[in-house]
Amino acid sequence: MRQKLVIGNWKMHGSLAANAALLDGIKAASARATLAVCAPFPYLAQCQTLLSGSQVAWGAQDVSAEARGAFTGEVAASMLAEFGVSYALVGHSERRTYHGETNATVAAKALRALEFGIVPVVCVGETLAEREARQTEAVVGRQLQAVLDALSIEQLGRIVLAYEPVWAIGTGKTASSAQAQAVHAVLRAQVAGKDAGVASRMAILYGGSVKPDNAAELFSMSDIDGGLIGGASLKADDFLAIGNA
Ligand code: 13P
């Protein structure tokens, strides 16, 4: 059985007070899946304080590809590791779109996270125009291949993959379970091209308007191992309901 994982991506939301209430709510309950929250950088210390010793892990939403040095505004993997971070999102579509992250950058970030024992959650996904042009498999295939080319088999065995169709993020339009499963199966097959064992063990999460009322259907699909949750991760009850789906 593959690990079942539900990760919240708070994006640029939160405050000390709101986070404390949210984290208290999340850690008080138990969920069937492994839970993690990816908080903005300034709140990672708060996550470490409030979540240490709980069942809930925490992560960052990005990590620098550079180890250290004159990179104003960047945050190094070594720094994240000091705050007990287990996961780092890499290549979220909002980073690719607004910050020009290329497939090569995303692969370099994944490598840097791994170097410090942080699990990179590698995000891939197509835009609506790409889907309508029947380019979905080609686009996510290129995004994944850059990471497959950069990582050893041992390193690949330590990543999580997330399929997030850009048109489903924050729009209320979820991919149907069949649409998501089809892409997940293609991604897993592509990983299997490098190593079948790693592919069979890799957690592949779906993200894009996952809510308590559609999570169970999505998670029932054979290649969907959990979710990457935006809006619904900001409400403890919704996040836990998804974690139990
Ligand atoms: P929503 O769940 O708000 O659509 O966001 C998905 C996402 O981008 C998670 O990384």
Image (spheres, rainbow, N blue to C red):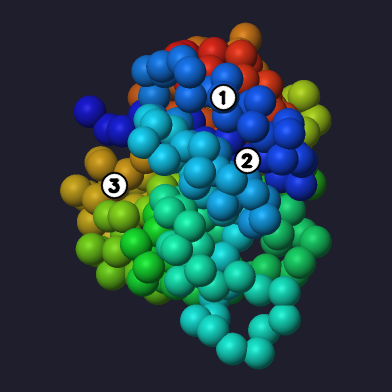
Left or right placement of residue 228 versus residue 71 in this view: left
Which amino acid is tagged 1? Asp
Q: Residue 204: in sight, yes or no? A: no
Residue holding disc 2 = 9
Tell me the quarter of the picture where residue 2 sits. top left
Position in image of residue 169 (x %, y %): 73, 37
Q: Secondary structure at mark 3?
A: helix
Q: CB at mark 2 closer than 8 A to ligand 1?
A: yes
The CA span between labels 2 and 1 is 17 Å
Label at residue 199 = 3
Q: Residue 64: in sight, yes or no? A: yes
Relative to residue 244, is residue 166 depicted above or below? below
Image quarter hosting the N terminus:
top left
Which amino acid is tagged 3? Ala
Work out whether mark 3 precedes mark 1 in sequence or the reverse, and give the earlier one: 1
Tell me the quarter of the picture where residue 166 sits. top right
Mark 2 nearby-residue class (10 Å; few <14, some 14–19, many ≥20): many
Q: Secondary structure at mark 1?
A: helix
Which amino acid is tagged 2? Asn
Relative to residue 75, is residue 162 depicted above or below? above
Position in image of residue 41 (x %, y %): 64, 56
Residue closer to the observer: 24 or 245 = 24
* Residue at x 54%, y 84% (from the top left corner): 68
Mark 1 nearby-residue class (10 Å; few <14, some 14–19, many ≥20): few
Residue holding disc 1 = 24
Q: Secondary structure at mark 2?
A: strand
